Amino acid sequence: LVVLMAVFTLAACQSADTNSDNLSGSVESKTITITVTVVAKDKTEKVFNIETDKKTLGDALFEQGLVKESEYKSGFYSHIDGVRADYTLDKSWWSFTKGGETVMVGANDLKIADGDKFEITNTPA
């Protein structure tokens, strides 16, 4: 019985070592490039070519300083690149699109991939 327990213990230790090696060695961040075009109320555009290893649009925007920390944490953006869109004040809001199509999830949940192109438009009512 003691020998059998020793064999199981040794096997478990080897398995744990193998798993920890895989976890520490296999996670590698990949840098991707996305394009974000911010369109102001007057239709002027500002283009940001963002290189990032982040996985979501919200993370990439926050990393670049395009959104405030408090808004990033809440997931509700009223400021983009320092410009305010506030529905309660003037019925304006930020519309997020990808390749011209409205995105159906929030920026913090929107997965990004290399070459993606997003538009963030200050949309008046």
Image (spheres, grey):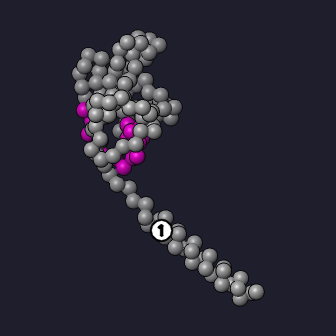
Q: Can residue 115 be spotted in the picture?
A: yes
Q: Amino acid at mark 1?
A: Asn
Residue 64: where, in percent of width, then height?
35, 38
Please name the residue shown 34% across and 21% down the image: 122
* Residue at mark 1: 22
Please name the residue shown 40% across and 25% down the image: 79
Q: Nearer the viewer, residue 125 or 81?
A: 125
Residue 61: where, in percent of width, then height?
37, 37
Quadrant where the C terminus sits is top left
Image vertical order of residue 42 relative to residue 6, above or below: above
Residue 15: where, in percent of width, then height?
57, 74
Q: Which residues are magenta?
A: 47-63
Tell me the quarter of the picture where residue 105 sits: top left
Mark 1 crowd level (few <14, some 14–19, many ≥20, 10 Å Cα)? few
Residue at the extreme bottom: 3
* Left or right: where 26 falls relative to 18: left
Please name the residue shown 52% across and 68% down the image: 20
Quadrant where the N terminus sits is bottom right
Q: State the SS at label 1.
A: helix
